[in-house]
Amino acid sequence: MIDPIEIAPVRSLPSGLEDLRREAAQQGFGFLERLVSDWTSGANTFGGPGEALLGAFSDSRLVGIGGLNADPYSSRSDLGRVRHVYVLDAWRQQGVGRALIDCLVRTARNTFTELRLRTATEAAGAFYVRCGFSPIDDPAASHALKLVEPG
């Protein structure tokens, strides 16, 4: 049995992010480097309308992270983007990623009518499909989720 997971907004880069960053880099993922760089420079602190950076914590230890922004690749104000989602290997297949995505989607419903994201791996693509996203053919995104049904 795993410890309960708490999903909570983070207002500053959380303690333990270095562990996620290191593991992601070892797996060839650079997006957590971008998260830290953009946060430090002020380019993206997830502070816009509807935006959030969430941490997944087990007994106060950061085991996952994920963000929600207005989509920077679109001029549509109703389009959100899931970004920088990462869960430590030891915590995968235990509902942590799903809990993060579910919370990001709930948060997004207050501001956005659709969420998009881009992933380059089949495993991540399959995960997002299990979370309700659909593959799309768009140069700026690989998956989308409608939050409001048209008309």
Image (tube, rainbow, N blue to C red):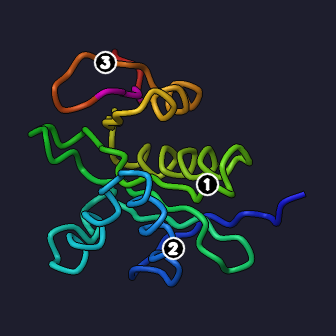
**Farthest-out residue, left:** 75
Q: What's the mark number on residue 19?
A: 2
Residue assigned mark 1: 89
SS label for mark 3: strand
Q: Quadrant of residue 144?
A: top left
Q: What distance separates the C-alpha of mark 1 from that of mark 2?
A: 11 Å
SS label for mark 1: helix
Q: Is residue 145 magenta?
A: yes
Q: What's the mark number on residue 136?
A: 3
Q: Position of residue 94 (x, y in %)?
A: 74, 48
- Report whether 73 appears left or right of 2: left
Tell me where the magenta segment starts and ends, as one range: 142-146
**Toward the viewer: 146 or 32?**
32
Amino acid type, residue under disc 2 in the picture: Asp
Q: Quadrant of residue 148?
A: top left
Q: Nearer the viewer, mark 2 or mark 3?
A: 2
